[in-house]
Image (tube, rainbow, N blue to C red):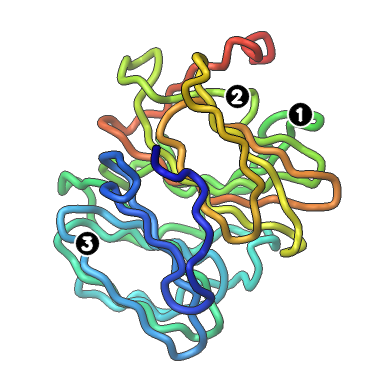
């Protein structure tokens, strides 16, 4: 089985690269770059669309034949301010030059040529509450179903307070049976506050064929090819994650795990 928990493989430059071939699936790609001032990173989208997310810091970005200026203003994700992002369609090049130390996520999925390059956020992204009690978390929707910015990608940020659960009640989106449920592959890029903290994520199927519980460190990525995938942040450690989803249709429909269906 493909390893679900991916640790960063470096501290500067590209530190994560997850391709569909590497993950053993068909749609989602994810890369992460940690840059120092003056560092450059560039790419070509090819037959895929890309969402560049300025997780932290500032960079001057050129893409799709345009200069988009300096994107980014939060220096820590835990400021919880809306991110600066750039959507780049297929068949285009992009380049980022770091103005400060910065972290740039490169989210990708197949494209169909339906959307132009565009800047997304911080305007139009509002931090909203989801859940109650110890299931409370805060969401920055970058490009979910309501935002018609992409062909395939669904992208969002989630902030889970210390001591709370997230991606809970447990749910899955691993069948293509719209409108009951949709097939969506998913990656989680995790950050911890403080950075030496830890959190937990479980990925499991109803039949138990897949059941992994992972201790998360700051900067880890978790792959969710199928099954339910709740997270928990221990008391004292705040949890952030950037979700990337994609599948054959751009709709997010899920089914709750039987043991928590009464909580929905």
Please report the residue visible at 51 percent of the width from the left and 52 percent of the height from the top.
221
Circle 2 is placed at which residue position? 170
Please report the residue visible at 59 percent of the width from the left and 48 percent of the height from the top.
126
Q: Position of residue 92 (x, y in %)?
A: 18, 66
Seen from the viewer's position, the closer of residues 211 and 122 is 211
Whichever of callouts 2 and 3 sits on the residue coming sooner in the sequence is: 3
Q: Position of residue 242 (x, y in %)?
A: 53, 51
Please report the residue visible at 56 percent of the width from the left and 49 percent of the height from the top.
157
Circle 3 is placed at which residue position? 45
Question: Does the residue at mark 3 contact the one at mark 1 (Cβ under 8 Å)?
Answer: no
Whichever of callouts 1 and 2 sits on the residue coming sooner in the sequence is: 1
> What is the quadrant of residue 96 in the picture?
bottom left
Circle 1 is placed at which residue position? 132
Whichever of callouts 3 and 1 sits on the residue coming sooner in the sequence is: 3
What is the CA distance from the residue labelled 3 to the residue labelled 1? Answer: 40 Å
Q: Residue furthest right?
A: 235
**SS under mark 2:** loop
Closer mark to the observer between disc 2 and disc 3: 2
Q: Position of residue 135 (x, y in %)?
A: 74, 31
Is 12 on the left or on the right of 134, as rendered? left
């Amino acid at each position: 089985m493909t390893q679900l928990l991916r640790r960063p493989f470096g501290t500067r430059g590209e530190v994560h690269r997850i391709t569909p071939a590497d993950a053993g699936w068909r749609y989602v790609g994810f890369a992460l770059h940690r840059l120092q001032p003056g560092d450059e990173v560039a790419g070509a989208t090819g037959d895929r669309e890309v969402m560049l997310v300025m997780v932290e810091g500032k960079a001057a970005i050129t893409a799709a034949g345009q200069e988009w200026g300096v994107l980014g203003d939060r220096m820590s994700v835990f400021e919880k301010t809306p991110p600066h992002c750039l959507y780049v369609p297929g068949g285009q090049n992009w380049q980022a030059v770091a103005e400060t130390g910065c972290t740039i996520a490169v989210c990708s999925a197949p494209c169909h040529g339906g959307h132009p390059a565009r800047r997304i956020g911080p305007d139009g992204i509002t931090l909203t509450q989801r859940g109650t009690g110890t299931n409370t978390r805060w969401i920055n929707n970058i490009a979910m179903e309501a935002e018609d910015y992409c062909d395939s990608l669904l992208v969002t940020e989630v902030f889970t307070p210390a001591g709370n659960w997230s991606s809970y009640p447990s749910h899955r989106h691993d069948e293509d049976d719209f409108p009951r449920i949709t097939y969506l592959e998913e990656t989680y890029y995790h950050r911890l506050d403080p950075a030496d903290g830890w959190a937990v994520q479980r990925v499991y199927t109803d039949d138990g064929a897949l059941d992994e519980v992972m201790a998360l460190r700051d900067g880890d990525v978790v792959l969710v090819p199928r099954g339910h995938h709740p997270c928990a942040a221990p008391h004292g450690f705040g949890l952030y994650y950037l979700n990337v989803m994609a599948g054959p249709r751009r709709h997010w429909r899920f089914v709750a795990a039987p043991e928590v269906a009464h909580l929905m």
